[in-house]
């Protein structure tokens, strides 16, 4: 398992006997560290791994990607190793908001090599065919910051630190450009289970846009609705995390039911 600074994958709490790996893709402006607490709450047999995009977190000194293909070029080699037998047998991708689109496109690229993830869990993001686009990546710094505040996913201590925000804004703007200009890349349909999670009071996604994720796979697609706005992952964490972990463990053999389910 890659865990060195040159790799985009970060493991915060190793599970010695893990049988499934949950690989988590952050939202625009987010970093792998946003999943640190998830790794502590995970069941004993699920190892949580955060994806560190270039220009974010401990990769701050690297140029941030401005388009989906460039980001995939950076991430896919390590993701391929994680999905092809380097560690726990089952790798499941989870992505929230922009991370959902990145996870989906990474899964499709890996499917070409014969090593897709065992399942895909997407959150708070319209299906690729329903992508909305946008122009905030061309907005002023003030307008961009106002949108970050509207969505509510940036820590208050970060929003209150003008020097830190100034340092982070270039990468955040690159993320906005990536997701606002994103259109589905050429590729086939997945064959893995897809789980779609969203909040019914999230202005960034509708029920129709969530249901359309069923178009991306020939496998089963389940949709589950919560409340709590775009970052319901935080406000409804006690309900959401068990659902995500259940999706990861569902890829394991049926014998998993005989094992303990406590963290």
Image: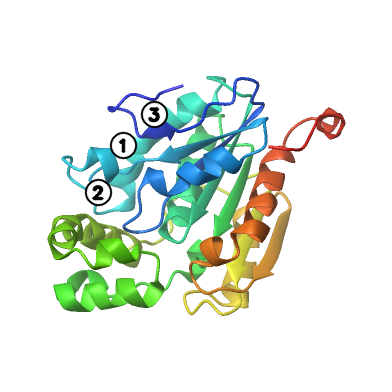
**Label drawn at residue 32:** none
**Label drawn at residue 74:** 1
The quadrant in which residue 160 appears is bottom left
Disc 2 designates what residue? 65
Q: Quadrant of the C terminus?
A: top right
The quadrant in which residue 211 appears is bottom right
Q: Secondary structure at mark 3?
A: helix
Q: Which callout, 3 or 2, points at the residue further toward the start of the chain?
A: 2
Q: Is residue 261 left or right of residue 162?
A: right
State the image coordinates of residue 249 (x, y, percent, origin top left). Answer: 71, 38
Answer above or below: position of 135 versus 96: below
Is 44 or 176 nearer to us in this picture? 44
Q: Which callout, 2 or 1, points at the residue further toward the start of the chain?
A: 2
Q: Residues within 10 Å of mark 1 (few under 14, many from 20)?
A: some
Q: Secondary structure at mark 1?
A: helix
Give the residue drawn at x 22%, y 45%.
55
Q: Is residue 92 left or right of residue 149?
A: right
State the image coordinates of residue 114 (x, y, percent, origin top left). Answer: 56, 29
Q: Verify CB contact (< 8 Å) between mark 2 and mark 1.
A: yes
Q: CA distance from mark 2 to mark 1?
A: 9 Å
Disc 3 designates what residue? 77
């Amino acid at each position: 398992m890659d865990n060195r600074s040159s790799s985009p994958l970060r493991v915060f709490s190793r599970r010695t006997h893990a049988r499934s790996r949950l690989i988590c893709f952050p939202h625009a402006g987010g970093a792998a560290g946003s999943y640190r607490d998830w790794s502590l709450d995970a069941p004993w047999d699920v190892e949580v791994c955060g994806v560190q995009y270039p220009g974010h977190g401990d990769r701050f000194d690297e140029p941030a990607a401005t388009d989906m293909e460039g980001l995939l070029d950076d991430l896919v080699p390590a993701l391929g190793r994680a999905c092809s037998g380097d560690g726990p047998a089952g790798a499941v991708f989870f992505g929230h908001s922009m991370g959902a689109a990145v996870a989906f496109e990474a899964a499709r690229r890996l499917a070409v090599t014969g090593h897709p993830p065992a399942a895909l869990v997407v959150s708070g993001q319209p299906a690729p065919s329903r992508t909305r686009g946008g122009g905030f990546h061309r907005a002023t710094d003030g307008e961009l910051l106002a949108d970050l505040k509207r969505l509510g996913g940036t820590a208050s201590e970060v929003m209150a630190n003008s020097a830190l925000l100034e340092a982070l804004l270039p990468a955040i703007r690159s993320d906005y450009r990536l997701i606002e200009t994103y259109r589905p890349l050429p590729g086939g349909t997945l064959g893995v289970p897809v789980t779609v999670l969203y909040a019914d009071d999230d202005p960034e996604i509708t029920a129709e846009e969530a249901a359309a994720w069923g178009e991306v796979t020939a496998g089963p697609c389940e949709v589950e609705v919560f409340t709590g706005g775009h970052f319901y992952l935080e406000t409804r964490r006690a309900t959401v995390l068990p659902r995500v972990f259940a999706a990861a463990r569902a890829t394991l053999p049926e014998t998993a039911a005989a094992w303990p389910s406590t963290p």
